Image: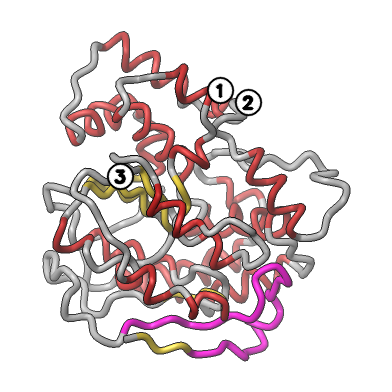
Amino acid sequence: MFTFKPLTSEQAQAVLVPCSGPSIEVHLNDQSDLPSGDGTRKVAAYCVLNDNYKASAERIRNLTVYEDDLWIVTAPKCGTTWTQEMMWLVDHNLDYTAAAKVNLLERSIFLEFCTIMPKFEEDTIAAVERMQRPRHIKSHLPMALLPKQLWTVRPRIVYCARNPKDMVISFYHHYCHLHGYMGTKEAFFEAILHDQVLYQPQIPHTLDFWSIRNEPNVLFIHYEEMKRDMAAVLVRASRFLDKSYTKEQLAQLEHHLSFDVMKNNNAANHTVLLDILQTLNGRDDVNPSGFRFMRKGKIGSHREELTDEYIAKLDTTRIKRQLQGTDFRFME
């Protein structure tokens, strides 16, 4: 069913982090049961994961899916947490009290977290299986590695895309502070260009879901449109979940989801996750730098930290090349 290819390149070795272990490429051999979409997707994306993932690949692939599930799927650092909080509240009648009492980590469980963090004691796959329905489930896995029942049971799926240039710098800081990466920026950025970092490649991951964007059970949104016109996104999200809210209610939700409010909301800003990961990384002085999971939340922040040369290389060798022949474009 799966092929596992160890990553032994210089770029892969340079970005290895002890908490995850050796990196591998995970490929699905038989893709016949994946959705054909609009015909623009030719081969479903593989994924860079860790050697520990091999033990759970079939288990995740065969996970029972229910029609009333809601799946939040994104590449890392592409508005996942923001989308989780938004969709949970829209789906739960804007119950801010319940959202404040129960951490987002429990309301919207990260399916494969225990596989990428072997030292984490809880089995997050089992936690998903035990969740009270209707379930909200988060994953960064590409289409090919997700449960196969997604394509027959057809629960609701929300996908959020983000410009790779902003993703790469956000992922770099995430890798340093959450995964314990101690290498250089240059090594990390080079590894991104060669798809040697956890959860890469990003662009085929996005194109897979773009190809099924017109399916009635799929909502495809962009991080950038959430930043620029959250009001319009909330209207789409409400319609997608067959919910009806007043303008005043949606305005209150928009305020709740604003970056300044979200970053200080400990029930949704992943402060708990940050503490867990830094403990797993063997850090006794938890978060000494004051790093926040929700760091800047800006469009175009890559210009502050990426060189013009690297931006041009990312544009030409990855983005333009991989989007060639498709009608998809990342928002700027």
User: Do the numbered discs 2 and 3 sit on residues whose CB atoms are within 8 Å?
Assistant: no
Three-letter amino acid code at the position of disc 1: Val
Label at residue 221: 3
Residue 13 is a magenta residue: yes
At x 53%, y 83%, the residue is 24
| Residue that label 1 marks | 261
Q: Is residue 244 above or below residue 12?
A: above
Q: State the CA–CA distance, disc 2 to disc 3.
A: 24 Å
Q: Which mark is in front, 2 or 3?
A: 2
Which residue of the protein is positioned furthest toward the right in this rendering?
Answer: 285
Tag 1: Cα neighbours inside 10 Å, few (<14), some, or many (≥20)? few
- Residue 159: image location, x then y, percent: 32, 50
Q: In which quarter of the image is residue 246?
A: top left
Tag 3: Cα neighbours inside 10 Å, few (<14), some, or many (≥20)? many
- Going by the image, does 72 lie left or right of 164? left
Q: In which quarter of the image is residue 83?
A: top left
At x 45%, y 22%, the residue is 98
User: Do the numbered discs 1 and 2 sit on residues whose CB atoms are within 8 Å?
Assistant: yes
